[in-house]
Amino acid sequence: MSSPSGARALTTEVADAVRLREGPEAVAQTLRLVGSAGTLTLKDLARAVHLPVPVLAAMRHELEARGVLVRNAGLALSPLGQDLLAELGGPWIPAVCATCGGTGVAIPERYHEVLHALQQLWEQRPSVDVQLDQSFALPESNLRRVLFALDHGAILGKRVLFLGDDDAGSVAVALLARALGSAVTVSALDIDGRVLGYLRDAATAEGLSVDLHEHDAREPLPEDILGRFDTVLTDPPYTVPGLELFLSRALEATGSQPGSQVFLSFGHKSPDEAVQVMASIAGMGLAVTELRPGFNRYEGASVLAGTSDLYHLVTTRDATAAVHGAQQGGIYTGELRPRTRQYVCRACGASYTIGTGQRFPTIEALKAAGCAKCGAHRFDQGRGTRAG
């Protein structure tokens, strides 16, 4: 068995090898979670430990190389790993609500018809545009987010705005209000005309009133939006410039009236980055009254294990936008952290570079166009590189 210092030394060694911003404790927590579950998939583990999948994959590699983790229908602890876990205090039974999935919001039976309608709508969603950092929230997350806002008095009788709405939250609000026999004014702004068409068709099919506007948040809000809303829900690009821009537009939409509510969905960040996020929020005079880690679940979004955190923000008397006028810099991940990937045609072996500034910015664009040499539409991924 390892010496009493063995577990501490190993977690530090692995954290250093991976350059883990969360430090050795994140390695220790990974061992605890795997030991408690018996086996975990990499994606489920990433959700539980709140680490990006590529970071966790690098940690897994280091732990496997040291004989701590093994593959067994998922990730499991080796005998050495179990000894190390004993030094860290041993496994435990996580106290996660099975009904709400740890979100704190269950979906009552009375809203099952609303959920069913959202599930049917979700099947008709357009393809994601990765250049806009799109990733569609699962119907259950969509409804839970709206129910969370409802429980905070931010929906019924309110003027509700969605800044970006590829998740169809505006339709969820309208469906919920109808189920409750209540009135609500709901609007949505989105840059993607496909999303707006999707929402418009859904509202028409359900006989709902949803006010839709095509708008790029990088441009100032339309005059008829300014100061009109009580509640804003937004799921912006998971970058600090994206955060500051969308929260600035949220403040403009509410007129920065004290007590207005903003429900922000944002990707989980390392401690260093989280400090910057909180500083940006506080600097705009927004109070964080609640934070629910891992609240939202998405289709895809594999880097973040398909989750994001939910912040409940309330405007104070000092609320002020950080961005005035048009946004000058980039806000999307691809703009701020350009990345390219290599793809190879399965049929003829032709190679293509996909990414920002390339002929094909996304693999979806390449598949749609087909291989220039043979016309095939199937490609295998090679290695990627990140600029900088």
Image (cartoon, helix red, strand yellow):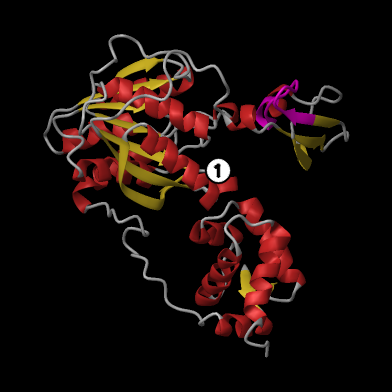
Residue lying at 30% horizontally and 21% vertically, measured from the top left? 253
Residue lying at 75% horizontally and 20% vertically, measured from the top left? 359
User: Which quadrant holds the N terminus?
Assistant: bottom right
Crowd rating for badge 1 (residues with CA inside 10 Å; few <14, some 14–19, many 20+): some
Amino acid type, label 1: Ala
Coordinates of residue 329 in the picture (x, y in percent): 57, 21
Q: Is residue 43 left or right of residue 388?
A: left
**Stretch of the chain drawn in magenta:** 353-365
Q: Classify 167 as above or below 109.
A: above
Q: Is residue 11 left or right of residue 280?
A: right
Q: Classify 269 as above or below 358.
A: below
Residue lying at 80% horizontally and 24% vertically, measured from the top left? 375
The residue where tag 1 is placed is 301
Coordinates of residue 347 in the picture (x, y in percent): 84, 35
Q: Is residue 36 left or right of residue 160?
A: right
Hey, which quadrant is residue 361 in on the image? top right
Residue 199 in view here = no
- Of residues 298 and 252, the one drawn nearer to the viewer in this rendering: 252
Residue 330 magenta: no
